[in-house]
Image (cartoon, coloured by chain):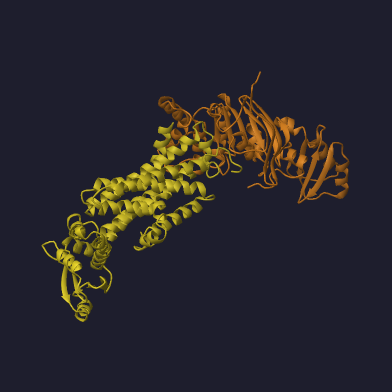
Amino acid sequence: MFTNDYKYTLLSTLRNKRLIGWLMIFPIVLSILFKVTFSGIYDKQVSFDPVPAAIVEDEPNEAFSSVIDSVSKGENRLLDVTYTNEEEALELLDKGDVFGVIYTSDIKLTVNGTGIEQTILKSFTDRYLVTEKLLNETAAKHPEKLPDVIASMSEDITVIEQDRLSQGNPDVYITYMYNLIAMVAVCSSVTGLSTVTETQADFSALGARKCISPTPKLINILAVLCSSWTVTAVCMMISVTFLAFVLKINFGTRLPLVYLGALMGGMTGVSMGFTIGSLVKGSYEKKNTAAMIVSLFFSFMSGLMLGDMKYIVQDHIPWFNLINPAAVISDSFYFLNIDEGYERFISRLIIMVIMIIVFTLTGFIFTRRKRYASI
Amino acid sequence: MEQTVVKIENLVKRYNDLIALDHLDLTIKEGEVYGLLGPNGSGKTTTMNCLLSLLTFDKGNIEIFGKPMSPTAYDIKKDIGVIMQNVAVYDELTVRENIDYFCGLYIRDKQERRRCVDEAIEFVGLEDFTKFYPKKLSGGLLRRLNIACGIAHKPKLILLDEPTVAVDPQSRNKILEGILQLNKNGATIIYTSHYMEEVEQICTRIAIMDKGRKIAEGTKDELKHMVKNTDTITVEMNDLPDSVLGQLKEMPHVYSVTYEDGKLVAACSGGKHNLIRILEVLQKNDLSFGRVYSEQPTLNDVFLEITGKALRDKED
């Protein structure tokens, strides 16, 4: 019974042009737009040009100078630095000869605009400031270990450079593509609504017809849910394939894991839709609107629309990023992108699995009712 | 002895302050075509939904095939077919796929299912439309598909809830013939409608419902015997003097005479040759007349007699 139920609900969903259009055409069109809009930035990224920066040595800072030296030398250097005074540095900044001015006294960064280069400079100074604290603490408590820490810090900063050079992944362009996949995954919650609308007697004649059949309701619900999962998974796979092989987006050597993340993300979105559909009473339009509002809210809070939002949330309510499906999905890609190892990626996959289970169980609980007060 | 297929006892269903079903009792025997007739809002569909265990109810018992009906009574459900008032099919599946899908909710065996689907398609006459999507079908064909989806698994009890709403006369006749054929094939039918002609045409027994209550029950003839009116005679004529109208009112078996818009309408109760006697009075008074016709009482008259209102007050 399940096989037949699953087969036809899958067929019906696959033939739903509006849904497939939303799940597949939307990310493809948007990714093409991204490609066209950001291709200039991408070219800059892949050309690995060092970022021009002016260094104002208003106070001697040997540790910082040694770090600057280590990242501004060699063939694949991160920075192209000019040592100068403040006045000239600001003039260079105004002229656009440098993208930022770094003061050695308090590692303050002044930039004149926003962009990839400015982001790299900010990341660099932020990373240094975090490490500097460690340096000072080590100097005070374990001076004998200071050379090791400096060496380690230099390695850390080189990682920024290496990440950029070898994997080419922390660039904003790729991040936009990851965010796009995450947003589509979350918005596939709309697909999950059908699990409710097609199985509830108080919602549709179709649901009523299923409820009066001898096929247990659980099987009916599971069949629709599985077909929604399948369709979303297929659409996510096609979207990632399109990005990787048609738009030639460089996902590095971890493409299979990008597929896995997209698959899990899609399933999370569908399950979330199932829960929303089961909790929100009323018409399909009402459920659909609720699903879209929740999806967009989660997307917004995870920074899929406003880059800094995730960090604001992380500062004030860090736990929210662990229960926000959009944040978890985008984080999985982000960690896959920047981490050498897989620990954080796997942790996000586990959270997604937990979310799928929780959402699905919640949906079942609220739709398991077999008799209705009114139809 | 005929088996009882459906037994509803003392069924009460309330929607807040509104009583949708008011201590309803129904007993339907095997092989019957049982009609539930009543105006919109009389409780017909609510009765069906309670019977199918889709709706909760406040009081009462429901038994189907001698067993208590419940949402998990799958052994009962497998022998029930339902044709809903609203068409319930997948827009993205073809005619054949839709029938196969719904049949698959009842029958696992693929070969048996294929045979059932073929027979259902033939039964409703959709052989030429098997690859059509529902949106490409006319209203009548769509209704036939809806019926095929409900009966493909060869149920022993078939519930039809206003299956001919918004259907053209040709398709309506085809549907009604089909229902009688299903009954001939051994299925017990419960048919709800507010079209009294349809109910009169196909039902072997009829319950008339109003405000959630069964106000009358019986065969078509039994119900018609409940009314005082046995025949209504209409005579079209240009003029009718009051004196003649008075004579007509004095006639035996004539209990109501009116003359409006050139039509003399006499309602008779019992007696024989009423028409001839009325015409004799008119002839004696040297009055000429046009068309003359006599009508037997309808279920609407029964409803009117019992409730004081027409069955089709709210006709759509």
* Point 15% across, 66% down: residue: A69
Residue A345 in sight in this render: yes
**Residue A323 at x, y percent in the picture:** 41, 51
Q: Based on the displayed image, in which of its 4 quarters is residue A46 positioned?
A: bottom left
**Residue A129 at x, y percent in the picture:** 27, 65
Chain given the colour orange: B
Residue placed furthest toward the bottom:
A87
Chain given the colour yellow: A
**Residue A4 at x, y percent in the picture:** 41, 33
* Point 17% across, 60% down: residue: A147
Residue A21 in sight in this render: no
Q: Is residue A134 above or below residue B227?
A: below
Side of A302 relative to B180 (left or right): left
Residue placed furthest toward the top:
B1
* Point 44% across, 44% down: residue: A358
Q: Quadrant of the C terminus of chain A?
A: top right
* Of residues B221 and A3, the one drawn nearer to the viewer in this rendering: A3
* Of residues A192 and A161, the one drawn nearer to the viewer in this rendering: A161
**Residue A49 at x, y percent in the picture:** 16, 65
